[in-house]
Amino acid sequence: MFEERKDRRRANHAFEDGEGVTRYRMQQKMISIGNDYWIDNDAGDHLYKVNGKVLRARRTYKIEDREGHTVATVQGRPLRIKDSMAIEDADGHRVALVKKALVSPLRDRWLIKAADGGELTVQGNVLDHEYTIERDGYKVAEVSKRWFRVRDTYGLDVGPTADHATVLAAAVAIDAMTHPGD
């Protein structure tokens, strides 16, 4: 048990050192139709476009690469008691479901249930874009606004073992559910 805790601590410190971590910048457009915005790398290059579809019965966001190819789709699930959004891969297969967990008085808690049965937990201040995504106590990604001073901009560090498309799509889903009018 001690060795497992030591391994987890070492793995989680990789985020502080930037060791094998990819940093993305989520930049929302200030004036947009359909909530379109860009996901950039840390050099400021546009990597993905989040294309919000406005005239649909359910909230839909397509994540496209620079060439316009769909990488993932995030879609709201209407008529559910709990707000949730499904994440599909480029072929339309569901890879995960993002939903809010039981209400906690101190922190927001969210779950990302993978289609393969795995589960990621999201903990922290989701409204202020200050949270972590973990699997079995190991940090998979970290979202923070503290790296940026620009309104509607926040960073997303994704670890080397994570599926980047799914983590980016989960961040889009969480943002859409916590800021539905933005």
Image (tube, grey):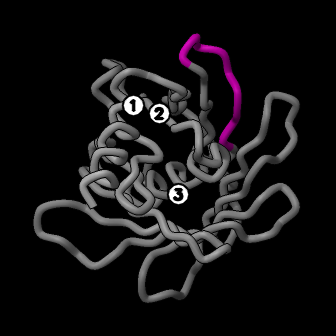
> Residue 15 — which label?
1
Query: Along the horizontal axis of the image, is 104 left or right of 173?
Result: left
Part of the protein shown in magenta = 42-50
For the residues labelled 1 and 2, say whether their Cβ atoms are less than 8 Å apart. yes
Q: Residue at x 52, y 57 (%)?
A: 173
Q: Is residue 24 visible?
A: no
Residue 104 in percent (x, y) is at 18, 71
Q: Residues within 10 Å of mark 1 (few under 14, many from 20)?
A: many
- Work out which residue is located at the far left of the displayed protein and give it: 105
Front of the two marks 3 and 2: 2
Amino acid carrying label 3: it is Ala
Q: Residues within 10 Å of mark 3 (few under 14, many from 20)?
A: many
Circle 3 SS class: helix
Q: Earlier in the sequence, mark 1 or mark 2?
A: 1
Q: To which residue does mark 2 refer? A: 157
Relative to 63, does residue 79 appear above or below in the rendering? below
Residue 7 in percent (x, y) is at 36, 45
Task: For marks 3 and 2, give the CA distance.
Answer: 16 Å
Q: Earlier in the sequence, mark 3 or mark 2?
A: 2
Q: To which residue does mark 3 refer? A: 173
Q: Residue at x 32, y 31 (%)?
A: 145
Relative to 57, does residue 156 appear above or below in the rendering? above
Q: Residue at x 12, y 62 (%)?
A: 106
Amino acid carrying label 1: it is Phe
Q: Earlier in the sequence, mark 1 or mark 3?
A: 1
Front of the two marks 1 and 3: 1
For the residues labelled 1 and 3, say whether their Cβ atoms are less than 8 Å apart. no
